[in-house]
């Protein structure tokens, strides 16, 4: 197929596969901690950073990344202040992100079209700088999980025991939120801010239907994500469809198929 010979599609496929690896890798830990909505929160804050980047003529994804990192610190601070209402921190930061983005949209009416592309994704416009950012985030997140796998496993399944054993809970909580912020910031140009949380959660939802252990759930989540990203981008390229939406719909199709099979097995 001629589309595979196009450099823009090769960059899109490489960027998609890298995010297809890192998003579900962090998503497994977020879902198990019941923090699935953190993706929506950080993506809205990232969009505010992107809007500011266009306004001050600085690399938008870089500014969005900084905003997401600051938001991750804010979430952890609020979670500490509202220990019994952890989800409140997510709602507060999301509200602030939406409000700030709205304000920046108003100030920069001339670049609204460019910013809107980050809402729905513009994977075909990935340039070399974008790929370096996505690759760096992929390496950093994968290395963090690989070197801290045992500690994170203990933290997510028994936080009290992890604290008693001397595990620095605050450090790991902040690092996990920061890694998630990096993944989301790197993903918004690929699948868009409105869909980025889908890559964090839907592959994990699929994996939980077939996996029988924590390690296998990570493997299946990444596999489902990579398959959906590959098939979604190829389908979008061939039939001229929106790539971000096609990838997410492909994931939902996989989830529906697994649910149907699982229901069939039970009957």
Image (spheres, grey):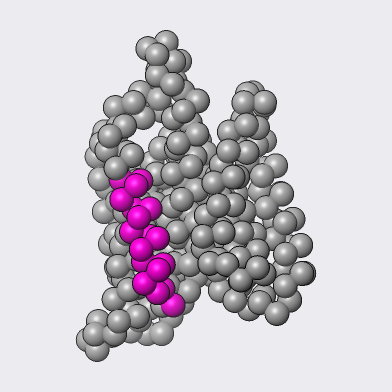
Q: Please tell me which residue lies in front, 141 or 242.
A: 141
Residue drawn at the location 62% of the way across and 31% of the way down: 77
Magenta highlight on residue 99? no
* 33 relative to 14 in the view: left or right: right
Where residue 42 sits in the image (x, y, percent)? Answer: 57, 50
Q: Residue furthest bottom?
A: 2
Q: Please tell me which residue lies in front, 77 or 220.
A: 77
Where residue 245 sits in the image (x, y, percent)? Answer: 47, 69
The boundaries of the magenta stretch are: 125-142
> Which quarter shows the C terminus?
top left
Principal secondary structure, stretch drawn in magenta:
helix
Where residue 190 sits in the image (x, y, percent)? Answer: 44, 67
In this orientation, does residue 267 appear?
A: no
* 113 relative to 198 in the view: left or right: right
Residue drawn at the location 61% of the way across and 59% of the way down: 49
Q: Is residue 43 above or below residue 30?
A: below
Number of numbered callouts drawn: 0
> Which quarter shows the N terminus?
bottom left
* 128 relative to 40 in the view: left or right: left
In this orientation, does residue 34 appear?
A: yes
Q: Please tell me which residue lies in front, 181 or 84.
A: 181
Q: Quadrant of residue 21?
A: bottom left
Residue drawn at the location 38% of the way across and 41% of the way down: 28
Residue drawn at the location 72% of the way across and 68% of the way down: 105
Q: Please tell me which residue lies in front, 47 or 196.
A: 47
Magenta highlight on residue 130? yes
Q: Is residue 153 above or below residue 201?
A: above
Where residue 150 sits in the image (x, y, percent)? Answer: 29, 27
Q: Residue furthest top?
A: 164
């Amino acid at each position: 197929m001629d589309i595979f010979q196009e450099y823009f599609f090769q960059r899109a496929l490489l960027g998609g596969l890298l995010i297809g690896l890192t998003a579900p890798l962090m998503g497994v830990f977020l879902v198990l901690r019941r923090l699935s909505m953190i993706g929506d929160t950080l993506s809205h804050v990232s969009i505010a950073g992107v809007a500011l980047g266009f306004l001050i003529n600085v690399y938008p994804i870089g500014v969005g990344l900084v905003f997401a990192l600051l938001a991750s610190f804010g979430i952890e601070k609020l979670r500490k202040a509202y220990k019994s209402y952890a989800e409140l921190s997510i709602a507060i930061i999301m509200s602030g992100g939406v409000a700030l983005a709205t304000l920046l949209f108003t100030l920069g009416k001339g670049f609204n079209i460019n910013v809107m592309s980050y809402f729905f994704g513009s994977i075909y416009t990935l340039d070399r700088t974008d790929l370096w950012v996505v690759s760096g985030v992929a390496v950093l997140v994968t290395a963090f999980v690989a070197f801290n796998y045992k500690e994170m496993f203990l933290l997510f399944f028994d936080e009290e025991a992890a604290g008693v054993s001397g595990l620095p809970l605050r450090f790991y909580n902040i690092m996990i939120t920061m890694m998630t912020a990096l993944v989301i910031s790197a993903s918004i140009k690929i699948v868009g801010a409105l869909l980025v949380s889908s890559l964090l959660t839907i592959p994990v939802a699929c994996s939980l239907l077939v996996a029988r252990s924590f390690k296998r759930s990570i493997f299946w989540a990444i596999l489902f994500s990579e398959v959906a990203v590959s098939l979604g981008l190829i389908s979008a390229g061939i039939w001229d469809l929106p790539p971000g939406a096609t990838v997410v719909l492909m994931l939902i199709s996989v989830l529906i198929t697994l649910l149907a099979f699982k229901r069939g097995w039970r009957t």
